[in-house]
Amino acid sequence: MGGPDMASHTGQARGATPPSDSPGQRSSRPGGPGALLDVIRSMYRYNEWANRRILDTSAGLTPAQLLEGGGASFDSIRDTLVHTMGAQWLYLERWQGRSPRKFFDDAASFPDLDAIRARWDGIERDTRAFVATLTDADLARVVEYTNMQGERWAYPLWQQMLHQVNHATQHRSEAAMMLTRLGCSPGWLDLLYFVDVEAAAAQKAE
């Protein structure tokens, strides 16, 4: 999905000054009140963008290819997408005080990409709404939950939220690998590529 240096593949040279008032400019100011909140918001914009990029690329597959074995953590691209979506839903439930003891549905309940996208769109809307309400105090709050094995765990909300994005990155990478093998690479999924795309879109909208 790309080498270690992506500067030559982005619309803005690495180290260049981002456009004023752009998302890139805001995210370049570490420290101070609201800094962690800015990071969380940026990471969840990235997460949604990367999820959509995988889904859009998967639309180029045949139904058989969507279900084809890929040698990753899950049996197919379909199963990988459903797991990634389910984990996002699960953590969102936990952050709102609920501890589901199973995923909402198994992969077989989603026969095609349209079914996956329809459910995921709703989860993304709920995630955006949740992120929009967050404060610094919310992020520092310790959230307890019971996992599917009946074990109780507790972590600050900000750690759980970054974990969820990182978990999604792992499985998006597996989906990207399987897509690439089928001749449908999703292209760049790196965070800094997204930062440049977002900054360019903000500048164009000015």
Image (spheres, rainbow, N blue to C red):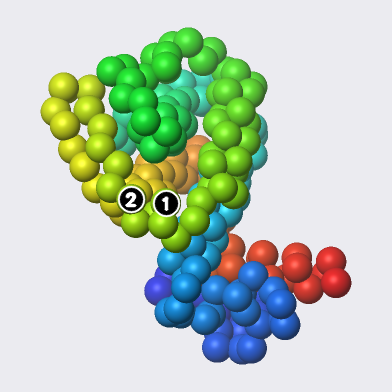
Q: Amino acid at mark 1?
A: Asp
Q: Amino acid at mark 2?
A: Arg
Q: Can the viewer see residue 184? A: no
Is 155 or 20 nearer to us in this picture?
Answer: 155
Q: Residue furthest right?
A: 206
Q: Which mark is residue 138?
A: 1
Q: Can the viewer see residue 89? A: yes
Is 188 or 110 nearer to us in this picture?
Answer: 110
Q: Position of residue 145 (x, y in %)?
A: 26, 32
Q: Position of residue 182 (x, y in %)?
A: 50, 38
- The residue drawn where x is 42% and y is 17% is 104
Residue that numbered label 2 is attached to: 141
The image shows residue 11, relative to residue 57, as above or below, that is below
Is 179 or 157 nearer to us in this picture?
Answer: 157
Taking the image as shown, residue 91 lies to the left or right of residue 112, namely left
Disc 1 packing (10 Å; few <14; some 14–19; many ≥20): some
Q: Which mark is residue 5?
A: none
Disc 2 packing (10 Å; few <14; some 14–19; many ≥20): few
- The residue drawn where x is 59% and y is 43% is 128
Q: What is the CA distance from the residue labelled 2 to the residue labelled 1?
A: 5 Å
The image shows residue 29, relative to residue 183, as above or below, that is below
Q: Residue furthest front?
A: 137
- The residue drawn where x is 43% and y is 79% is 31
Taking the image as shown, residue 152 lies to the left or right of residue 80, namely left
- The residue drawn where x is 61% and y is 84% is 13
Mark 2 and mark 1 residues within 8 Å of each other at the beta carbon: yes
Number of marks drawn:
2
Dot 2: element: loop
